Amino acid sequence: MRYLCKTADDVLRTIKDEKIEMVDLRFTDLPGQWQHFSVPPGALDHESFSEGVGFDGSSIRGFQEIQESDMLVAPDPATAFLDPFSEVRTLVLICNIVDPGRGQAYGRDPRHIAQKAEAHLKQTGIGDVSYYGPELEFFVFNEVRYDQSTNFGYYEIGAMEANWNASNHDGPSLGHKLRPKEGYFPVPPADALQDARTAMVLCLEGLGIRIEAHHHEVATGGQGEIDMRFTTLTRMADNVMIYKYVVKNVARRRGMTATFMPKPLFGDNGSGMHVHQSIWKDGKPLFHGTGYADSSQTMRYYIGGLLKHAPALCGICAPTVNSYRRLVPGFEAPVNLAYSARNRSAACRIPVYFATPSSKRVEFRCPDPSCNPYLAFAAMLMAGLDGIQHRIDPGEPMDKNLYDLAPEEMAKVKSTPGTLEEALDALEADHQFLLRGDVFSENVIETYLDYKREREVNEVRLRPHPYEFVLYYDI
């Protein structure tokens, strides 16, 4: 249940009226994982919302060092919801981070960066609101085992609907298994996870998140997708964090395990996060017009910004070594930096399901759900705004299967980076567009790059596959 709170008074009243027994304070670290600690209701008062609640920031990835570890969380009353998975009545509050030394918002807080991006959009005068509608894909497995040490390394996945289990003798063989790349859209019993996804949808809607559809995805072994109704940038990033929490915990309650790892299965489709986005001003959509696929010139410039900065964006939007097991030709992976209507082999797609002005948007297909949504949405908006401000021409649309082009044609189409290391190098070389309006900072970019290179690129290089699976499964 989501509570309609606006102020600290609303939250404190809700705690009393709803007989809340525990309050869970949540925030997001720099790589994009939800973190939390809990306090009893009596520990919260009005000052907790205005001044914050203290915690140790030295153990949080991308935050403070040990000699400057004291940090504060400032709960946002508008995010209050009842945790559907706790044994006792637990109120969840999503928080911003405050630096007590400066008495102001913490510069490396991803949620604060998202809020600054929204403020920057208004300051440019281009628009006053940006909408986001990400399509997060995920896998639900029946079991997963993985480990790596000095003398061994392995991972093993069990999925009741996958064809690799067709010959198992651990129970009656009932058939109806999904072969690789044949998971889109069979009905049960081949789709063995209909009820599980429905339970996830009902839980999300109970938390106030509007859902448009759910379905099995292309891969075998339990790949699914639940589509959320679009909303504003920071609110949608909050919803993504709730979405992941719900999917993982509903699966857990049903004796299964869920992951948003981009590519857990070799030789089959990976999990992407195609992000639909648009800009509005004074209640009117700015991306609808009379151009190609009913697009406006503003929209095409926005696309130009996305395509120009796509290699750098990949460092934030496809931020793991495993992301580049997904970003390979085929598998509907959008490695080609081009745009089109209806063409899913292009990095930017203009959906044409409906002709209404309010439905006109661009879908950026490179991101995957391992990213930090606050940083990813903010970075995409900044790239698009750079395209509008500098009138970046995206070129001609590519209305053909880009995987079947002749070699001489293919050589003219730029591609996404082939590794995380290349994407991070691109981000290091091209991030000035992120610094405008003080949305990102050099310190944030440097800290992010250092973390990714030291913790992920070097770790996987020193401890090769399957350490990659060990490192990323819990995403």
Image (tube, rainbow, N blue to C red):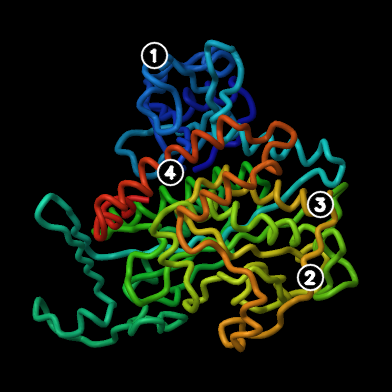
Q: Residue at x 60, y 71 (%)?
A: 336
Residue 21 visible? The answer is no
Residues at marks 3 and 1, CA–CA distance in whole angstroms: 44 Å
Kind of residue at disc 2: Gly
Q: Are marks 3 and 1 in contact (CB under 8 Å)?
A: no
Residues 189 and 407: in front is 407
Q: Secondary structure at mark 4?
A: helix
Residue for point 22% across, 61% down = 144
- Left/right placement of residue 91 relative to residue 461 reads right
How far apart, in angstroms, are the residues tagged by discs 2 and 3? 24 Å
* Residue 296 appears anywhere in the view: yes
Q: Amino acid at mark 1?
A: Gln
Q: Which residue is disc 2 drawn over?
A: 395
Task: Give the quarter of the image for residue 284.
Answer: bottom right
Q: Are marks 2 and 1 in contact (CB under 8 Å)?
A: no
Disc 4 target residue: 452
Q: Are marks 3 and 4 in contact (CB under 8 Å)?
A: no
Disc 2 vs disc 3: which is toward the camera?
Answer: 2
Q: Which residue is mark 1?
A: 67
Few, some or many residues within 10 Å of mark 2 (<14, 14–19, 20+): few
Q: Earlier in the sequence, mark 2 or mark 1?
A: 1
Residue 352 rendering spot, x and y as whole percentages:
73, 75
SS of the residue under disc 3: strand
The one of 21 and 358 positioned closer to us in this rendering: 358
The amino acid type of the residue labelled 3 equals Trp
Q: CA distance from mark 3 to mark 4?
A: 34 Å
Q: Residues within 10 Å of mark 4 (few under 14, many from 20)?
A: many
- The residue identified by callout 3 is 280
* Residue at the image position 63 percent from the left and 39 percent from the top: 114
